[in-house]
Amino acid sequence: MRATSLVAVLWLGVLGLETNAAEVLVAKVDGTIGPATAGYLSRSVDEAEARHANCLIVELNTPGGLLQSTQTIVQKFLGSKTPIVVFVSPMGATAASAGCFITLSADIAAMAPATTIGAAHPVTIGGAPGGDQAKPDDTMVKKLENFAASYIEAIATKRGRNVEWAKSAVLQSASITADEARKLNVIQIIANDREDLLRQLNGRVVRGATLATDHAQLVRTKMTPAEQVFQLAWKPEVMFILMLVAIYGLIAEVTSPGAILPGVAGSIALVLALYMAAVLPVNLAGLLLIGLAVGLFMIDVFAPTHGVLTAGGIISFLIGSMMLFNRSDPVFRLSLAYIIPATVVTAAFFIFIVGKGLRAQRLPIKVGKETMLGKIVETLTPIDANGGKVMVEGEYWNATSETPVGPGQSVQITAVEGLTVKVKPKMQGA
């Protein structure tokens, strides 16, 4: 009986071990590093700690991103109680710019074959530490380089990585392959895929704890719908399009009051564009030139100058669009494929649509009672202050006149009140 009970207890223990098998959380980042990415990875770290996961694997493929978001992620990784593994994958992926900082901040850095890491020069990381997003001068560039070099040196020292190479990635934009990275002690593991990575992680000691990943239960952390939207939308092209929608919508509402829909759409687009401009590395001079272009278009519409101001507006809009983002930045670069069509469409919008609409509003009135004022008509009956009849464009109208007028005489309409017109005798020679 005792033997049977002992077997049952052992069996239940085995089942309990299988049920409580070690968990490994997996997060995937494929694209630009921005606020959505920072929020997603921070939440993944918190979830890994709450579940007492064996480790958190971040599969990374990024051309870079914003410095402020990168700092948020690095701080979260360095303060994590759960071991962090950054895996640059799949084959052909890259951990450039901001991705280099993130990879070095992990407890264990791994790369797939045919991947690269490096090119962490601070000018290519959107935004300065203090949030200055204008184009930096030589002094600012030097400050950024010194800050980024000391920052990546601190990260590499903390994780026991190659400090000299880390600094060269910032100061010289050095970039290396996975094989070179392992030889230079930039990473520890080269793995073909996730399964290979789990096998190589198994048994490694991280901060005194041994990883058990060989048969671990994988738990995928996903971006929330809001994070997915912002991750996809956090691009210069999206902000540029929102600016155009805001311009077209608000101008359409001003020129056609009561339309409502253009004004609502333009207002929403304007708020979103301003929100993105507060985070993306936007050049203030570019924004001002675009605003100047809109002003020149509007002035030329209300006070025609034979196209001189419109031509100036087109040039201002084109230059402002090209200056809006740093075109040498591979991450936040606004392509000419967006700039040139937008310039043409904007110019056409103001020249043909807004311009024609406003000029039409200034044309003489061609319908309604107002068109009757000043017309010369003949009386049908005698007309005095008590009344009479006139014929106006084939219609009989009641008429009054302070000066009595006989039938068959020419009179001029001076006012229209309801169905009665006021007339006065036609002046001789008029």
Image (cartoon, rainbow, N blue to C red):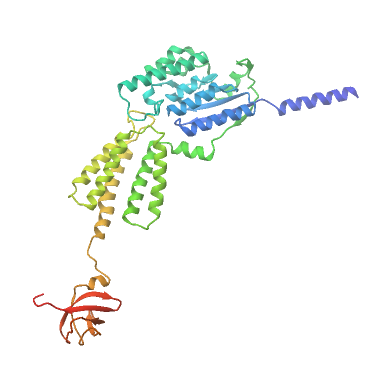
- Expressed as whole percent of the image width and height from the top left, the position of residue 255 reads 31, 55
The residue positioned 48% from the left and 40% from the top of the image is: 229
Q: Residue furthest left?
A: 429
- Expressed as whole percent of the image width and height from the top left, the position of residue 308 reads 18, 46
The residue positioned 25% from the left and 40% from the top of the image is: 316
Quadrant showing the C terminus: bottom left
On screen, residue 80 versus residue 368, left or right, reads right
Q: Residue furthest right?
A: 1
- Expressed as whole percent of the image width and height from the top left, the position of residue 379 reads 19, 84
17 or 50: which is nearer to us? 50
12 or 350: which is nearer to us? 350
On screen, residue 40 versus residue 292, left or right, reads right
Question: In the figure, residue 394 lies in which quadrant?
Answer: bottom left
The residue positioned 41% from the left and 17% from the top of the image is: 149
Quadrant showing the N terminus: top right
Count of marks placed on residues:
0
Q: Is residue 114 visible?
A: no
165 or 409: which is nearer to us? 409
- Is residue 306 positioned above or below 102 on the image? below
- Expressed as whole percent of the image width and height from the top left, the position of residue 76 reads 53, 25
384 or 270: which is nearer to us? 384
On screen, residue 1 versus residue 386, left or right, reads right
Q: Is residue 293 visible?
A: yes
Question: In the figure, residue 369 lies in which quadrant?
Answer: bottom left
